[in-house]
């Protein structure tokens, strides 16, 4: 069992599945805690500003994407904290994970094909390669 997990989430179906696995990993642990990191890349940030304009509304909309995960954690009585970060998702998650002491990092796989992965790289691959603790990638 793990006690402290970092969950990379963005509100997608992949991150909801990842959250369920993260909760199963901490179940039965001592003082289980899950930190949720949501990284907003530059393009998404610009789009949000153009679409919503108001930074309070933008923050609210971003947290709203994570509300299903929050509800699941509250239902299971697992403590959690949400961390909103800006930057490129892969390096931001790696830096955050390596700056803290986590038992495991859990994140979803976006399902890129081989060509897309080769050209773009995948966040999950970057995280798995560079994070210093165990990483679980959920398909």
Image: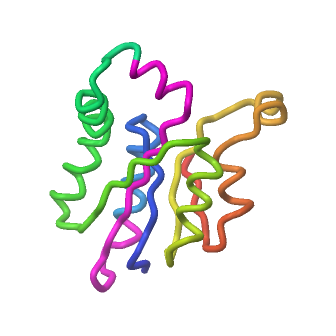
Splitting the image into 4 quarters, where does residue 15 fall? top left
Residue furthest to the top in view is 51
Place of residue 112 in the rendered image (x, y in percent of width and height, measured from the top left): 69, 32
Place of residue 88 in the rendered image (x, y in percent of width and height, measured from the top left): 61, 41
Quarter of the picture containing the N terminus is bottom left
Splitting the image into 4 quarters, where does residue 61 fall? top left
46 versus 65 height, above or below: above
Q: Is residue 34 left or right of residue 7?
A: left
Q: Is residue 57 left or right of residue 11?
A: left
Q: Is residue 64 left or right of residue 90?
A: left
> Bounds of the magenta span?
24-49
Splitting the image into 4 quarters, where does residue 7 fall? bottom left
Q: Nearer the viewer, residue 13 or 55?
A: 55
Place of residue 43 in the rendered image (x, y in percent of width and height, measured from the top left): 56, 25
Q: Residue at x 19, y 49 (%)?
A: 71
Q: Residue at x 63, y 35 (%)?
A: 111
Residue furthest to the front in view is 54
Residue 36 colored in magenta in the image? yes
73 versus 43 height, above or below: below
Residue 44 colored in magenta in the image? yes
Q: Nearer the viewer, residue 43 or 73?
A: 43
Place of residue 89 in the rendered image (x, y in percent of width and height, measured from the top left): 58, 44
45 versus 76 height, above or below: above
């Amino acid at each position: 069992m793990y006690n402290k997990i970092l969950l990379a989430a963005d509100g997608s179906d992949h991150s909801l599945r990842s959250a369920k696995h993260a909760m199963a990993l901490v179940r039965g642990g001592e003082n289980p805690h899950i930190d949720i990191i949501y990284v907003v890349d530059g393009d998404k940030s610009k789009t949000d500003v153009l679409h919503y304009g108001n930074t309070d509304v933008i923050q609210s909309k971003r947290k709203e994407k994570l509300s299903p995960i929050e509800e699941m954690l509250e239902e299971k009585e697992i403590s959690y904290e949400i961390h909103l970060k800006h930057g490129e998702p892969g390096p931001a998650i790696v830096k955050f994970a390596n700056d803290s002491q986590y038992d495991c990092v859990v994140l979803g796989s976006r399902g890129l094909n081989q060509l897309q992965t080769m050209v773009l790289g995948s966040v999950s691959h970057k995280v798995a390669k560079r994070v210093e603790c165990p990483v679980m990638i959920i398909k």
